[in-house]
Image (cartoon, rainbow, N blue to C red):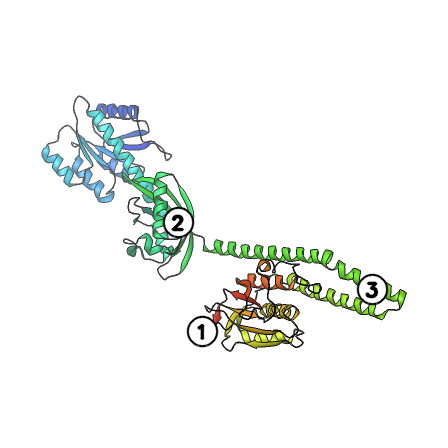
Amino acid sequence: MTGVGTDDGPGRVLYVEEDSDLAGLLEAYLERERDGITVEVCDDPRRALERIREGDVDCVVSDYALSGMDGLELLSAVREEFPELPFVLFTGKGSEDVASEAISKGVDDYVRKGAGDRLEVLARRVDNLVAGHRAKTSYRELFDKATVGLTVHDPETGESLNPNAHYCEMLGYDPGEVDDLTMTDVSANEPPFTAERAQEFVRKAVEEGPQSFEWLDERKDGERIWVEVNLRQADIGGRERVLASVQEVTERKEREDRLQAANDRLRRQAERLDEFASVVSHDLRNPIEVARSSLELARMEDDFERLDRADEALDRMQTIIDDVLTLARRGDLAEERETVSLREVAESAWGTVETADATLAVDPNAGAVEADPETLRQLLENLFRNAVEHAGAAPAVRVGPVEGDDGFYVADDGPGIDEADRERVFKRGVTGDDCGTGIGLSIVDAVADAHGWSVSVTGASDGGARFEVTGVETLGEAWVDGA
């Protein structure tokens, strides 16, 4: 026993036949031999037409010789109102002329009554027609009623077939414009969102099973939108296809991006607070002990030089606190970016550092950069302070563009930094002498990282240290490397 029963219930066959004995025989045979088929008998063609109009009929089987309206006239009436409803002419009084006319009017099959296996032949053909009709009906209803974008892909070519109205609207096309659209037309066409990769997903849906992924599409007007795509293999109209469900998720992706950015800021803030706690518990302990011991000895010995030492320890504590607060007080070190003059920011930063006999020269080709002006100034202040403290009594400090026009450098003419130490100088706590806090260059690294820049240290042309900040969006005339 075979059949086409589905989740929507059994297949419904309307048999139009005036011979009640034959009608009963066919009804019993089909329902016994074809699981999932039910037969409803009607002996009046006009009443049969009314029944078809009520719906829920998957196939019509009709005799030719009927009173008041023959089988061909009923076929013509059905085709006029229901052009896709399967219709089988099952007759014992027809002729080749009747068969030819039935075919011209759109009959789906023509079976002669008689002995032998005629009922089995009819049963097989009805079975196939009901299954095909149900597949077409489900497919059409799915597309018509869907609230998401739907389209069908040819697994061999990847071509998009029969997209529904929601899909067209989502991508900004009129229904008549989408017949020739390809994956290249609707994809962003930048890695990894290429037509080739989309075709790979279609192939996998056939070979490996359903596929789900997010994709970047491009609307007709050029706007890019995020979509969620679900692919699954389907047999549609007797052909292997891939059914695609496509739903726009741009707002969700933007929310996720904002949430990720917020999480990243919280993570960085937590790292800074952890660093703050480490400094408070460890780095401040030594100068506090120095100050306490110096004050105690000064009281005992009336030694004012001890007070000077205590004062120096307090100054060092203030420097440590200022540096740590720079790291801890801001959630985002590149929060408010704008176009700023590198020369102006460098000169402003130089004015806030105790430079003694040091000198500053800013390359005239130093143009403008996109940066948070406050934290860019802090970055430069720390590089200047590092040069003043480690490059000798009267260092010459230079600021200028790096070769390639994507950043800037700060260089000095001091002894430089050993190549073996260059990778670790940006870590907190690394300092070249007892006076440094070991935090200044970690601030430089944090500011650069927040802007999406990279910072490194090399040797300057005159043997000093050269710090290069790259990946910077620069504006102005082409820069020439002058250091």
**Real-space Cα distance between discs 2 and 1?**
47 Å
Classify 10 Å Cα crowding around label 2: few (below 14), some (14-19), many (20 and above).
many
Label 2 is placed on what type of residue? Val
State which mark lies toward you, 1 or 3: 3
Q: Which mark is residue 411?
A: none
State which mark lies toward you, 3 or 2: 3
**Real-space Cα distance between discs 3 and 2?**
74 Å
- Towards the viewer: 123 or 229: 229
**Real-space Cα distance between discs 1 and 3?**
56 Å
State which mark lies toward you, 2 or 1: 1
Q: Mark 2 points at which residue?
A: 246
| Location of residue 81 in the rendering, given as x and y in whole percent from the top left corner | 24, 44
Q: Mark 1 points at which residue?
A: 478
Label 3 is placed on what type of residue? Ser
| Residue 247 appears in the picture as rendered | yes
- Towards the viewer: 343 or 245: 343
- Towards the viewer: 192 or 138: 192
Q: Earlier in the sequence, mark 3 or mark 2?
A: 2
Relative side of 439 to 362, left or right: right
Q: Earlier in the sequence, mark 1 or mark 3?
A: 3
Label 1: which secondary element: loop
Q: Name the residue under label 3.
A: 294
- The quarter of the image holding the N terminus is top left
- Position of residue 409 relative to residue 187, above or below, is below
| Residue 332 appears in the picture as rendered | no
Residue 392: quarter of image? bottom right
Q: In the rendered picture of this protein, how many numbered marks are placed on residues? A: 3
Residue 438: quarter of image? bottom right
| Location of residue 382 in the rendering, given as x and y in whole percent from the top left corner | 62, 68
